[in-house]
């Protein structure tokens, strides 16, 4: 296997009875990369990720994660992989500090639990019992448990569901810090802005197949898409035109208006536009 790859997948397949959840996925994730998996409900994201984590058996295909087959991992493999599931177990009677210290004990080179609690923004809840946490705070605890072992590779399944906007921004900062320190990160999300903010590349999965892998800027070839230029006419109506050369059009408008163009906007398709087109076409 290529040492530059954290994950290498060829021909991955998984069915539940007659329901084919993953129908032949090929995927490479480079070391140090932040990779986001997007796709509608039931597309096969969680199944794919849980096979990579070693939690589900595959029916067919080659899978290498940090050089091991997750179905039969080598010695210390598990301690090198961090996992944040869609809601970890309940630890009702324990405090945040107790749970994080307990998990730290599973790893040979764990981070200081107090530091981890601080990093996920739970310092003022360290002594709180976990059943008293809000949904977003529980999610932060899940993230703490995923990173306390200083993983080389971190999987995050819909990590910010239930976060308020400020908590999401803080979480994004945390992910950027981890990525800057060299951690490879694979996350699933339904938030296009999250993928755009964090991911080096995104993979869109639909109907168990990887439809496209690209940088957020290049997904759906939206760089090449026409720009929409709109402005207000002297009578107050909004007019718009699609253009491959919006700069020339804006210059022409500026000349026509003799300066400022009223209500001028220039837009290109967003990542969400590209994604919805891709999903809608299937
Ligand atoms: P979501 O965005 O809703 O989390 P997903 O992309 O993660 O969806 P999966 O959870 O991988 O999708 O599900 C893919 C398909 O496999 C779905 O049709 C789902 O019903 C089915 N499936 C998933 N887990 C099981 C299971 N344990 N037993 C039977 N069918 C399953």
Image (spheres, rainbow, N blue to C red):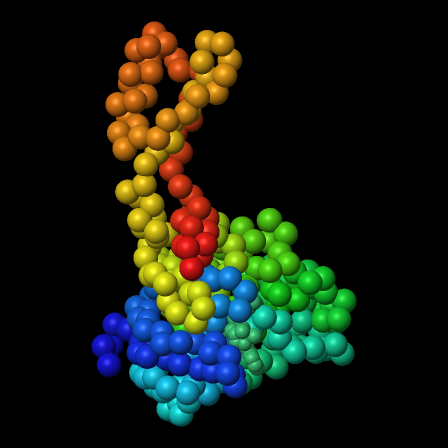
For residue 29, above or below residue 59: above
Residue 224 appears at what percent x and percent y?
28, 42
In the image, 167: left or right of 253? Answer: right
Q: Nearer the viewer, residue 102 or 162?
A: 162
Residue 13 appears at what percent x and percent y?
40, 81
In the image, 54: left or right of 167? Answer: left
Residue lying at 42% horizontally and 59% vertically, measured from the top left: 282
Quarter of the image for the N terminus: give it.
bottom left
Q: Nearer the viewer, residue 279 or 162?
A: 279
From where the camera sits, is residue 37 visible? no
Residue 101 appears at what percent x and percent y?
60, 78
* Tally of marks: 0
In the image, 104: left or right of 180? Answer: right
In the image, 43: left or right of 164? Answer: left
For residue 87, above or below residue 248: below
Locate residue 136: give its quadrant: bottom right
Locate residue 100: give its quadrant: bottom right
Residue 191 appears at what percent x and percent y?
52, 54
Residue lying at 53% horizontally and 69% vertically, measured from the top left: 42
Residue lying at 33% horizontally and 10% vertically, measured from the top left: 256
For residue 196, above or below residue 97: above
Q: Nearer the viewer, residue 89 or 132?
A: 89
- Tell which quarter ligand 1 is in: bottom right
Residue lying at 33% horizontally and 61% vertically, measured from the top left: 213
């Amino acid at each position: 296997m290529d040492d530059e790859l954290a994950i290498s997948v060829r021909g991955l397949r998984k069915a539940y009875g007659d329901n084919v959840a993953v129908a032949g996925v090929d995927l490479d994730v480079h070391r140090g990369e932040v990779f986001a998996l997007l796709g509608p409900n039931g597309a096969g994201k969680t199944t794919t990720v849980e096979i990579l984590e070693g939690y589900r058996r595959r029916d067919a295909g080659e899978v290498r994660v940090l050089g091991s087959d997750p179905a039969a991992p080598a010695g210390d493999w598990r301690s090198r992989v961090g996992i944040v599931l869609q809601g970890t177990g309940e630890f009702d009677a324990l405090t945040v500090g107790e749970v994080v210290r307990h998990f730290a004990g599973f790893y040979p080179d764990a981070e200081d639990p107090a530091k981890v609690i601080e990093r996920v923004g739970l310092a003022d809840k360290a002594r709180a019992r976990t059943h008293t946490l809000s949904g977003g705070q529980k999610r932060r605890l899940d993230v703490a448990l995923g990173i306390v072992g200083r993983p080389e590779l971190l999987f995050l399944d819909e990590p910010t569901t239930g976060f308020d906007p400020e908590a999401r921004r803080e979480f994004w900062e945390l992910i950027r810090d981890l990525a800057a320190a060299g951690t490879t990160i694979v996350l699933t999300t339904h938030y296009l802005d999250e993928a755009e903010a964090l991911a080096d590349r995104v993979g869109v999965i639909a109907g168990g197949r990887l439809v496209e892998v690209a940088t957020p800027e290049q997904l759906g070839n939206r760089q090449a898409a026409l720009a929409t230029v709109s402005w207000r006419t002297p009578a107050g109506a909004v007019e718009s035109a699609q253009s491959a050369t919006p700069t020339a059009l804006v210059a022409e408008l500026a000349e026509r208006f003799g300066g400022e163009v009223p209500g001028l906007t220039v837009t290109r398709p967003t990542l969400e536009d590209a994604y919805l087109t891709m999903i809608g076409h299937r």
